[in-house]
Amino acid sequence: MEQPAPDPARLRRSYEVGSLTESGLPADPLALFTGWFADAAASELLPEPNAMILATASDRAVPSARTVLLKGYGPPGFRFFTNLTSRKGQDLAANPRAALVFPWHPVHRQVIVSGPVVPLTREESAAYFGTRPYGSRLGAWASEHQSAVIDGREELEARYAELAERWPDHPGDGHAVPLPEFWGGFRVVPETIEFWQGRPDRLHDRLRYVRPVSPEGEPDVDAGWTVDRLSP
């Protein structure tokens, strides 16, 4: 017998495992992010703690969102890689701003990063692409027209087999499969980073770091951060 779906209006959980206060808060939000990221990875409740929701918008302000993987972060920003001709790639080419959400629900936490997006250099993309597993590198080529309609999975698998024959696997040689022209990375430069900690009775803690914006409209990466507490 098919299991009935639960009523989403009746699904509730009380968050009682932590708090987030201004006391002892680090001046640099990346220090707090690093600690939370380490906690998320150590909890073993999140199979992919680097999974994040990437939200973009087209040149006509049509929004879209999907899950991608964080592949590095630091003062310059949060890095990820993708097919440049995909929907997100086209969105970012036309409207280079984005928001990231780290949905660490099992540990009752969430982080939201927003700001302008900068393409990574070809050299940066090539350096990372060479570290990917052989199958993932072939997969990037096989899905050259990411987000486009295809006739069926057979088309994708046939393309993969063709590429495997062209570039046989050579263990230890990360450059046997070349970097596609249509593939690369981006860096989200944070203007704001919000940390959300679940609390009982929906009185959640929300602390948002804000970085000043330069006269040119870009985040001033040399300036300090201010912190606001937001109503839940």
Image: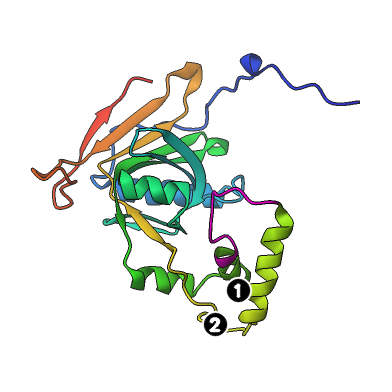
Left or right: 109 in relation to 219: right
Tell me the residue that label 1 is attached to: 134
Tag shown at residue 211: none
* Crowd class of label 2 (few under 14; some 14 to 19; many from 20; radius 10 Å): some
Asked if marks 1 and 2 touch (Cβ < 8 Å), the reply is yes
Instruction: Out of 10 and 85, give the one closest to the viewer.
Output: 85
Q: Amino acid at mark 2?
A: Ala
- On the image, the x and y values in percent for residue 183 come to 45, 63
Tell me the residue that label 2 is attached to: 176
**Nearest to N terminus: mark 1 or mark 2:** 1
**Residue 133: quadrant of the picture:** bottom right
Task: Name which residue lies at 51% across and 40% down.
Answer: 104
Q: Quadrant of the N terminus?
A: top right
The secondary structure that dominates the magenta segment is: loop
- On the image, the x and y values in percent for residue 139 come to 60, 65
- Furthest-front residue in this view: 151
Residue 183 in the magenta stretch? The answer is no
Stretch in magenta: 141-151
Residue 146 in the magenta stretch? The answer is yes
Classify mark 2: helix, strand or loop. loop
- On the image, the x and y values in percent for residue 52 come to 48, 45
Instruction: Out of 129 and 212, give the one closest to the viewer.
Output: 129
User: How does the figure colour the protein chain or chains?
Assistant: rainbow
Task: Name which residue lies at 35% across and 33% down.
Answer: 61
